Image (spheres, rainbow, N blue to C red):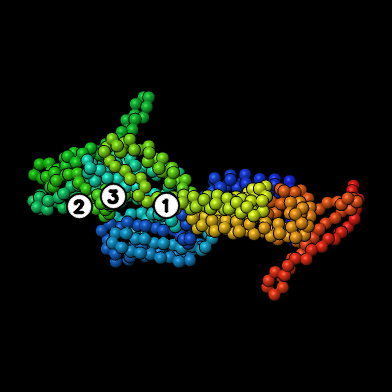
Amino acid sequence: MISFIVRQSIRYAGVVVALALTIVIYGFYVLTRANLDVFPEFSPSQVVIQTEAPGLSAELVERQVTQAIENALAGASGVEHIRSQSIPGLSVVSVLFREGSSVYRNRQTIAERLGGLANRLPHGVAQPAITPLTSSASTVLGVGLTSEKRSLMEIRTLVDWTLRPHLLAVEGVAEVNVFGGDVRQWQIQVDPGRLLRYGLSIADVVQAARRATGVLPAGFVRTENQHVIINLESQPRSAQELGRIVLGQRSGQMLRLSDVGNAVEAAAPSISAAAINGKPGVFLMVQGQLGANTRAVTLELEAALKEVEPLLAQEQINIFPRLFRPANFIETAVSNVQRDLLIGSALVILVLFLFLFNTRTAVICATAIPTSLLGAVLVLDYFGVGLNIMVLGGLAIALGEVVDDEITDTETTDTESTDAGGDHCATDPTNLSVDALAAMNHGSIVCWAAHQTSWDGYDSHGAFVSHWAHQGKQNGSDSGASHGKSDWGHSHKP
């Protein structure tokens, strides 16, 4: 089989060169669009559901929230296991599906099961939410913000209302998690003594505050030409306006929220914190979507951060855009492969030129190294395997094997041809045997095919003549080479 490949490769050298050029050109095209990630996807097909239950203990969350969700999901198509975790104020349910199942169909199945669950959960518990679809190594960028002039509340407000939506608009971003800072709130800090004095309860205060927010419908006005909708905007514009909301009436006197407490702008109870270079700040962790190109998403995120840098400079906020950047690992791995490729090509050219004194053979053989690498990339792309640091590391190791084959096989072939026919055979592949050529690897086949279009020919009498050489082994060691010349057949030139 190998002899047949060698024979056809040399006979149709133009086809071999054309195929090699096709591999190189199309390989470069695929390489520029290959999916670059840090690690291969190793997590099972799963859907994670989070449900917020403010004020409930872990026992109540497990009994009233988590069990209700597990019962609703039991029996769903393709489900293998259901795992759950209940902590104070939060329920996390992980649904694992069969390996190889469609993750989008699994999410659709879970969403249908959760559709009718809201009415069976306790009052005040949020609607169960499916977490964004992310990869196992989902974090693509970590960004930090600090300021000497702005408070943590001002930084967090800018992040929540400006920076986070801007980053979520980048293609390939699944979620942006924010840690640290103070979340701005309008709070009614109730005085229990005043409530007792006016005979009110906390529920009365909550109901009054709820009426004070939102946009309420107020009917419509119909004229001869149009139908005008009227909306009542009761949303206060400041904490002071919130304090002037009417709470009730006692003894002919209007009671306002400010009469039973203080309406102030303050920070929400903190559940996270962040420090950037030892200073309190805000940290953003950007999560990439499943199957997204980590390096491409990182570059787009950095471009998006460049767009908001003038705003941050105006607000006197310092940004640290590369606190955590997994793309560095990818770029280092790609750089290592490029370095190994250049070193391997240089070694092949140097060794073959110094020992064989054949520049053309050395240069042509060196071209087999990138051809082999790009061929491997095409095979990986065909099977849907992306490039990650493990794959790139394997390619770097494989390049060493290719270099070894290039040098040893070419040297062996040159020795075979020299022993078979003298110096003339060393430079004239027409005297090179099929067995010697069969000892070469794919890269050497390309080399000799480009060197000579045919290894067979006609003698001076017009007879078709082929040369052969045989090298064998005895007792595990080389026994030398026996050479001869045989006329495979005689025919006249056509």
For this rendering, which residue is in front, 103 or 70? Answer: 103
The reply to whether callout 3 and callout 2 are in contact (CB within 8 Å) is no
Q: Which residue is mark 3?
A: 276
The reply, left or right, for residue 477 in relation to residue 491 is left
Q: Which residue is mark 1?
A: 326
Q: Which residue is mark 2?
A: 203
Q: Residue flagged by tag 2: what amino acid is it?
A: Ala
The reply, left or right, for residue 196 in relation to residue 11 is left
> Could you say where residue 179 lies in the image, as x and y percent from the top left?
30, 51
The reply, left or right, for residue 101 in relation to residue 490 is left
Choose mark 3 or mark 2, whichever is in front.
3
Q: How many angstroms separate mark 3 from mark 1 (CA)?
A: 18 Å
Task: State the SS at label 1.
Answer: loop
Query: Residue sitting at 78 percent across and 66 percent down?
Result: 482
Q: Residue flagged by tag 3: what amino acid is it?
A: Ile
For this rendering, which residue is in front, 407 or 211? Answer: 407
**From the viewer's perspective, is residue 49 above or below residue 219?**
below
Residue 363 seen in render: yes
Q: How many angstroms separate mark 3 from mark 2 (CA)?
A: 41 Å
Q: Earlier along the polypeptide chain: callout 3 or callout 2? A: 2
> Could you say where residue 152 lies in the image, as x and y percent from the top left?
24, 46
**From the viewer's perspective, is residue 232 above or below residue 49?**
above
Residue 23 seen in render: no
Query: Residue sitting at 36 percent across and 24 percent down?
Result: 224
Q: Earlier along the polypeptide chain: callout 1 or callout 2? A: 2
Residue 66 picture quarter:
bottom left
> Could you say where residue 338 lies in the image, as x and y percent from the top left?
53, 50
Q: Residue flagged by tag 1: what amino acid is it?
A: Pro
The local crowd at label 1, few if under 14, some if 14 to 19, many if 20 or more residues have their Cα within 10 Å, is many
The reply to whether callout 3 and callout 1 are in contact (CB within 8 Å) is no
Task: State the SS at label 2.
Answer: helix
Choose mark 1 or mark 2, whichever is in front.
1
